[in-house]
Amino acid sequence: MNARHPVGYFGPTSNPCADAARWEDEQDRLDEQAESLEIEAYGIALAALGSKQASWFKAHDMGDALIAPDEALTDALGNDTDVTDAFDALMTDPAAQKLREALACFIAKHNWREIAGWPDAA
């Protein structure tokens, strides 16, 4: 038999049905383990993001990974509707007024020609 078998495959034996059932059981176990680790990783990441000792723009030690929250936010804003919805709610909250003003100042400083319709803005 030249076909490649999935990792964790212990066959073939004389009982292909048992081989298939064992392989399915292994896949179910791996799925459960991945779900459990994802829940654990959520707790680690949440604790790291809630830490007052680290800057939002520095990589945070999250288990075996160093992750920069600002870069993760940028990726998530384009790919995760929950993050986008939460960011929209945050940015429209009155508490974010200072951030909106600073962001508007930055945008205006770097894009004033395009915004104001400067003749050579193309």
Image (cartoon, rainbow, N blue to C red):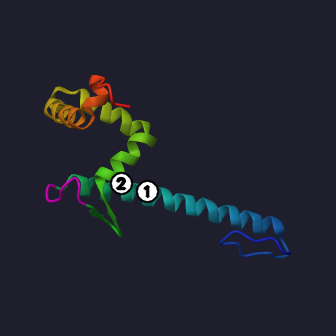
Between 106 and 98, the residue placed more toward the observer is 106
Q: Evaluate if marks 1 and 2 touch, with contact meaning CB atoms under 8 Å apart.
A: yes
Hey, which quadrant is residue 107 in on the image?
top left
Tag 2: amino acid: Tyr
- Return the x and y of residue 99 as percentages of the image width and height: 17, 35
Query: Secondary structure beneath disc 2?
Result: helix
At x 14%, y 59%, the residue is 53
How many circles with numbers are drawn on the protein? 2
Query: Secondary structure beneath disc 1?
Result: helix
Hey, which quadrant is residue 111 in on the image?
top left
Residue 57 is a magenta residue: yes
At x 18%, y 56%, the residue is 55
Rendered view: 100 above or below 45:
above
Within 10 Å of disc 1 (Cα), the crowding (few <14, some 14-19, many 20+) is few
Between 45 and 96, the residue placed more toward the observer is 96
Question: What quarter of the picture does the N terminus occupy?
Answer: bottom right
Rendered view: 109 above or below 51:
above
At x 21%, y 31%, the residue is 104
Q: Which mark is residue 91?
A: none
Residue 88 is a magenta residue: no
Region of the chain picked out in magenta, as a range = 52-58
Say which residue label 1 marks.
Answer: 38
In this rendering, would 31 be left or right of 70? Answer: right
Tag 1: amino acid: Glu
At x 53%, y 58%, the residue is 32
In this rendering, would 82 be left or right of 27? Answer: left
- Return the x and y of residue 47 as percentages of the image width and height: 25, 56
In this rendering, would 64 be left or right of 2? Answer: left
Say which residue label 2 marks.
Answer: 42
